[in-house]
Amino acid sequence: MAVTKAVASPKEFVVSEVEKDPEVEKDPVEAQEAAANFRVKFFSAQDALVLEKMETGTPTASYNDLLLRRQALQLSLSRGFDTLLSLAAVRGVQPLEYQQQTVSHVLRNLRGRVLLCDEVGLGKTVEAGLIMMEYLLRGLVRKVLILTPPTLVEQWQEEMRTKFNLDFVTYDSAAFKAAPNPWTAFSHIIASLDTAKREAHSQQVLEAEYDLVIVDEAHHLKNNRTKAYQLVSHLKKKYILLLTATPVENDLGELFNLITLLLPGQLETAASFKRKYISRGDPLKVKNVADLKRLMREVMVRNRRSETGAISSRRRAEVIEVNLSAAEKAFYQRLTTFVRGYYTPGASSPTTGVNRFVLKMLQREAGSSPEAVLSTLSKMALNLDHPAPLRNVCNTLAAQAGEIKERSKATALMRLLEKIDDQVILFTGFRETQQSLAALLREHGLQIAELHGNMRRLEKEEQVRLFMNEAKVLVTTETGSEGRNLQFCRNLINYDLPWNPMRIEQRIGRIHRLGQTRNVYIYNLSAAGTVESYILELLDAKINMFQLVVGELDMILGNLKEKREFEDIIMDIWSSYADEQELERQMDHLGEELMAARDHYQAVKELDDRLLGELLPNE
């Protein structure tokens, strides 16, 4: 049954329907009679009277009632929430049964206001995206705001684009910054919660109206006296999803604060909650468990790994140490001296005439291959905006890079590939390195597939099929593999290492994900004396990153005292200390902070498992 398209007023509705009748002529008198007959024929006496008054301009209090009835009729004719429309709209992901059940439960029973507390790695992002899509497809949501920690903004943008085919503008993009009031100008926004709560932005954020707000890592809102909590509390929103695997950290009052953000009054007041449900003298001991369970089930969902059967495979990681040749080592040291001379730690903008991002890129490229760094140095040497002395240095460094004949990491790679009798994904962060590695592997008679950011979608799909069916090695960049599920492969080699740990996690996530049935093996090539060797020491030896469950890394990084990008912290340390002993001391200090953050996360995780296990059993 078709639903009549909404029109501006009841009068226009009647006229539009009458005009569809071929027996009605356009004579005004006959049109009025036809309209009257139409009202009697299709509407109750009460509604017909309302329509007649509206046609004659007579005001009536029943107008809103009529519109509500028409809206209810339209909704009753649409497919119910028992049928998930989003399943046909998502790409590259097959939601599991527990995720589909979660989405249906949120839509049908929780009215789009929920605390999603799945254990780490079970796909809360996918669940939130599916809920969002259901509302978008039904026309119940148009404007969406996603608030995350700064380190997860890019990851959320990629997830929304690759899995849900939705383009979200990020708060740090040029388009967002150029808009007079970007918080009202864009319909789909991903922003850092830290940015949104600042006085420079909070007023505009609070002026905007949002149909749906999603807050990731919502445990950062546990304190109701913070600016972040107050911002989310006062946002104009219809639906809200709070995502966290650890809603309780210090006491049950934090759980009260989060649930009050969703449904004020659900747990009554803070005083009554404490009196009814928290044992005297122990803020983590629950009383009246049955009553609290009933109230929490009305606003909370928690899926457990043990109950879902998700990702049973494990990770195995190995560091392949590489000794650079004399020429490679001399070049790396000379380039590092150049970078340290121009890079200003802690500065937010260039102070030496050279872009900080370019300097960081040079240092990263030098750890990958001469081909990668040579490209950037050549461009800098040709840049007439740079002073002549700087261009001369870039020319000299480029010439030195071009003279390097050895490729120690490439030699180590070939030895490693001989030992792996299975398919392998070979990751690099740079297109020039990817090209040189592809050529090298072909020279050695290996059949390979390639992925990089310059390929079109159909080309990428063809290469994935080639890798799936014939090729032994897939040589890819991060951008080339975005949105690709490659869990039919279980071996991954990091030829070079991203400085952002979340990018390392994303690489691993291409194969260690839902649907992977075998253990995953990760091989990291590490050249001694490079930034990457220090990063591997920090992430592998200090926090055992490669053994973590999917999603745990961002929880640990979120506990660091310094709320900056990890790669900026690394670059500031690297550029500040040329003395090797002092450099190691500073890196060790960062390692101790990482270990403390890991220990804190483990303690909180154990606490939440115990409390939520008591409050939300599988019933």
Image (cartoon, rainbow, N blue to C red):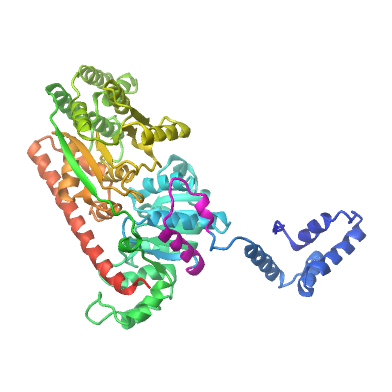
Q: Position of residue 158 (x, y in %)?
A: 41, 44
User: For the magenta stretch, what is the residue range?
Assistant: 84-110
Compared to residue 577, the image places residue 334 above or below, namely above
Which quadrant of the view contains residue 18?
A: bottom right
Left or right of residue 236, residue 563 in this image: left
Is 67 included in the stretch rendered in magenta? no
Is 106 included in the stretch rendered in magenta? yes
Which of the pair 253/385 is nearer the observer? 253
Identity of the residue drawn at 21% across and 60% down: 602
Overall secondary structure of the magenta section: helix
Compared to residue 453, the image places residue 25 above or below, namely below
Query: In this rendering, does residue 498 appear at all?
Result: no
Q: Position of residue 53 (x, y in %)?
A: 80, 69
Q: Position of residue 284 (x, y in %)?
A: 25, 74
Left or right of residue 546, residue 144 in this image: right
Query: In this rendering, does residue 25 appear at all?
Result: yes
Identity of the residue drawn at 67% across and 65% down: 73
Residue farthest to the left, as pictured: 581
Tell how many labels: 0
Which of the pair 275/506 is nearer the observer? 506
Identity of the residue drawn at 68% across and 71% down: 65
Q: Position of residue 442 (x, y in %)?
A: 30, 23
Left or right of residue 42, residue 402 in this image: left
Compared to residue 52, the image places residue 465 above or below, namely above
Which quadrant of the view contains residue 558?
A: bottom left
Q: Quadrant of the N terminus?
A: bottom right
Q: Quadrant of the C terminus?
A: bottom left
Which of the pair 437/418 is nearer the observer? 418
